């Protein structure tokens, strides 16, 4: 296996693919460099003397600057690299001419055709509360229906409790309504029971109108305070009817162009930008070439690599929307007195990521090289096919929920540290290193770590694509096998 990796010819650091001990000698660019201290796998080693303030370059871009002069062979980490990020920036549009030579292979998957024209990859029954006060009710209805039916004929019966729907104002209230509305319209549900309380800010009758033209035969509303007697029994009676309809639905062959996939990373490490994220990028370009759709989010983790995305916008209008996407999130940070570069997390640093630019340049590789065709505010639903950008924070569950809510059928989630969670669509975990895949087989669905061990990227991508199509056709991922299904809604303002 390769000991070290220089990602880009312009780089002045290399990544230790395997841990390097003090005194080890590495050969790079015709020079032999002595490693000056123990360096863990995934971390960076300087391959030239760096002056104080000099940019540290990885992926061909600065990831920050040296806090102090460092010798070649030094371990470069968060203790001696400082971010270059600060405040708002002015941007210029320099459009790139992107041509991807990827054939349309006319592949298909087995999905569910819905009456509104959408396609789902699951046929589940969902119990959705308008407000956190009825969380106990929706949990009981879902549990009772699972016990009665054994989920026969459907892919699952789930409740999705949350904390909101009341005591919220302004954007927070609208965000809650939008995410719940998006769930009502999501094609992975064959039927949905919406349970309200009656006195909440998110009034059930107003929310029903907010949902617009929904599938009235498959989505029903009840208001607990208007029910005489046991609201669980009343809700269960409606849920039984909905289940009876959903279990009659059957999978049919669907073009791959109908597939919509969210792209997310969390618990990233120094291998993320070398293995799993580039693998998602290859898949993203492939799916876009088939006429399908991918969505990149976690805007704060674009900081430092945003110009790469801006220059790939298909129009000046999309460029302007992307500038707003970035600067609005920077304003959000600054309005709370927080620096825009307050990232990465302790786990990221332990894994070899030193600055937000380091993280962002790896993160943005998940969307490959395709042109950006759409830019969406938080809570809005997909309107165009191809690569889209979505406004949401970096938080794993909030961002994954936002990806599902914009209409993604599944979320591809790369991780170097590992995480078990799942949102309300299949949440496939892709490990950046083989150690994690071996240690957590009940979390990790696909191991991209083999790329660092020498396996060909295109061969891995083909296996990965085949696996994604199987999942779209019904094969469960680990969060589904484990029963982990959650939602989280973005909150910014006060709680009354």
Image (cartoon, rainbow, N blue to C red):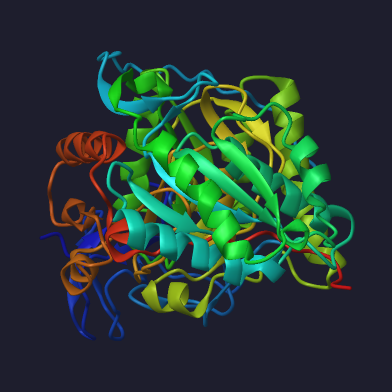
Residue 395 visible in this rendered orientation of the protein: no
Q: Is residue 422 visible?
A: yes
Residue 250 placement, left or right of 378: left
Seen in the image, is 406 located left or right of residue 30?
right
Q: Quadrant of residue 329?
A: bottom right
Residue at the image point whose x is 49% and y is 80% from the top: 346
Q: Is residue 492 above or below residue 81?
A: above
| Residue 266 located left or right of residue 168 | left
Q: Position of residue 468 (x, y in %)?
A: 27, 39
The x and y percentages for residue 86 are: 75, 62
Does 101 appear above or below 410? above
Give the image location of residue 92, x and y in percent: 74, 33
Q: Is residue 234 left or right of residue 429?
A: right
Residue at 75% x, 23% y: name it: 317
Q: Quadrant of the C terminus?
A: bottom right
The location of residue 434, given as percent across then percent down, is: 18, 64
86 above or below 91? below
189 or 32: nearer the viewer: 189
**Quarter of the image that includes the N terminus:** bottom left
Image quarter for residue 406? top right
Viewer-side residue, 53 vs 280: 280
Q: Is residue 310 above or below residue 344?
A: above
Q: Residue at x 45, y 68 (%)?
A: 353
Q: Nearer the viewer, residue 486 or 138?
A: 138
Q: How many marks?
A: 0
């Amino acid at each position: 296996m390769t000991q070290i990796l220089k990602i880009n010819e312009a780089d002045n650091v290399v990544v230790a693919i395997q841990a390097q001990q003090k005194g080890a000698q590495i050969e790079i660019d015709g020079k032999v460099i002595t490693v000056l201290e123990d360096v863990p796998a995934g971390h960076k080693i300087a391959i030239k003397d760096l002056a104080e303030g000099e940019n540290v370059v990885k992926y061909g871009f600065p990831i920050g600057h040296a806090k102090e002069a460092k010798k070649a062979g030094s371990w470069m980490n968060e203790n001696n690299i400082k971010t270059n990020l600060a405040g708002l920036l002015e941007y210029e549009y320099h459009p790139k001419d992107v041509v991807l030579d990827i054939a349309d292979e006319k592949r298909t998957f087995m999905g569910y055709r819905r009456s509104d024209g959408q396609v789902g990859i699951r046929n589940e029954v969902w119990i959705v509360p308008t407000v956190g006060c009825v969380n106990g009710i929706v949990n009981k209805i879902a549990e009772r229906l699972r016990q009665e039916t054994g989920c026969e004929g459907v892919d699952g019966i789930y409740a999705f409790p949350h904390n909101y729907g009341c005591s919220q104002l302004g954007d927070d209230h609208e965000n809650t309504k939008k995410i719940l509305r998006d769930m009502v319209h999501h094609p992975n549900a064959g039927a949905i029971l919406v349970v309200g309380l009656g006195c909440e800010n998110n009034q059930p009758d107003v929310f029903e109108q907010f949902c617009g033209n929904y599938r009235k035969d498959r989505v029903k509303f009840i208001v607990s305070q208007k029910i005489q007697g046991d609201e669980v029994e009343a809700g269960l009676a409606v849920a039984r009817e909905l289940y009876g309809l959903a279990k009659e639905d059957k999978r049919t062959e669907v073009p791959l162009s109908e597939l919509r996939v969210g792209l997310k990373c969390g618990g990233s490490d120094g291998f993320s930008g070398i293995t799993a994220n580039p693998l998602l990028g290859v898949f993203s370009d492939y799916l876009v070439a088939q006429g399908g759709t991918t969505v990149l989010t976690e805007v704060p983790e674009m900081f430092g690599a945003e110009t790469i995305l801006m220059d790939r916008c298909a129009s000046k209008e999309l460029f302007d929307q992307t500038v707003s996407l970035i600067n609005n999130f920077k304003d959000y940070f600054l309005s709370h007195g927080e620096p825009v570069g307050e990232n990465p997390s302790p786990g990221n640093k332990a894994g070899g990521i030193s600055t937000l630019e380091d993280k962002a340049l790896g993160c943005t590789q998940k969307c490959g090289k395709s042109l950006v065709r759409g830019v969406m505010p938080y809570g809005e639903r997909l309107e165009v096919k191809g690569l889209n950008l979505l406004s949401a924070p970096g938080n794993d569950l909030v961002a994954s929920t936002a990806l599902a809510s914009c209409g993604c059928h599944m979320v591809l989630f790369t991780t170097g540290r590992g995480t078990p969670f799942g949102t309300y669509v299949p949440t496939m975990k892709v490990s950046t290193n083989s150690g994690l895949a071996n240690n957590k087989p009940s979390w990790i669905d696909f191991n991209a770590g083999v790329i660092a061990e020498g396996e060909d990227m295109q061969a891995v991508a083909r296996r990965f694509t085949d696996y994604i199509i199987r999942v779209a056709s019904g094969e469960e991922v680990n969060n589904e096998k484990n029963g982990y299904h959650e939602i989280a809604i973005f909150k910014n303002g006060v709680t009354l």
